[in-house]
Amino acid sequence: KTLQAEGININFVQDNQSSSNYGVIRGLHYQLNPYAQVKLIRVLAGSILDVAVDIRKGSPTFGKNFSVELSAENKKQLFIPSGFAHGFSVLSEQAEVLYKCNSFYNKESEAGILYNDPSLNIDWKTPAGKEIISEKDLGLPLFANCRNNFEYK
């Protein structure tokens, strides 16, 4: 009802849950159209820095990022529309993250951006040398070279 009151009518079809330790940085991830996903992120245990990057060509905030601390304690959630790349870093010893999606996972449309792209200048709140990044995420392209079919409307 809260989302509907704000004009957001989303039918969530998939829930994902991940468990990560301190220093883990996941992302930046998204799915291309027509399989783009809207996400609603919350933390069940621990705390994370949740990050969204606007990748909609022509948007006044194109290439800008937004971050917020989500935790089991503060009970905040972050709504991420399609056309935004998403990632998070784990700030607590361990974190359980739950995110709802309005579209099912589609491997062929999976895309991403390298977490430490200098043009994005994201402060993940993780000390240098303490980052834990998956091989898959280390292989993601820079923002300037990412696969992107989103347009601002």
Image (tube, rainbow, N blue to C red):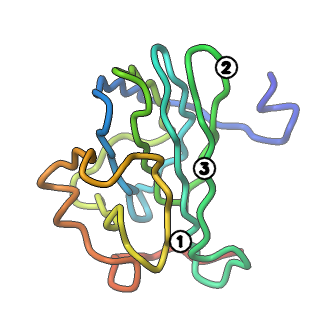
Q: Residue at x 42, y 25 (%)?
A: 92
Give the percent coordinates (x, y) of residue 31.
38, 57
Residue ID for mark 2: 74
Give the residue type at disc 3: Ser
Q: CA distance from mark 1 to mark 3?
A: 15 Å
How far apart marks 1 and 2 lie (CA) works out to: 28 Å
Residue at 67% x, 26% y is 76
Q: Nearest the camera: 74 or 109?
A: 74
Q: Amino acid at mark 1?
A: Ile
Q: Earlier in the sequence, mark 1 or mark 2?
A: 1
Residue 24 sits above or below residue 56 on the image:
above
Mark 3 crowdedness (10 Å alpha carbons): few <14, some 14-19, many ≥20: some
Q: Residues within 10 Å of mark 2 (few under 14, many from 20)?
A: few
Disc 2 residue type (three-letter): Asn
Instruction: Say which residue label 1 marks.
Output: 55
Q: Relative to 67, is 129 on the left or the right?
A: left
Residue 124 point in image, percent of width and height: 45, 51
Q: Farthest right residue?
A: 5
Which numbered disc, 1 or 2, marks the residue closer to the eye?
2
The first of marks 1 and 3 along the sequence is: 1
> Residue 129, relative to residue 65: is it above or below?
above
Name the side, left or right, on which 35 lies relative to 42. left
Give the structural element (helix, strand or loop) at label 3. strand
Specify whether 52 is left or right of 58. left
- Label 2 SS: loop
Say which residue label 3 marks: 67
Picture coordinates of residue 65 (x, y %)?
A: 59, 63
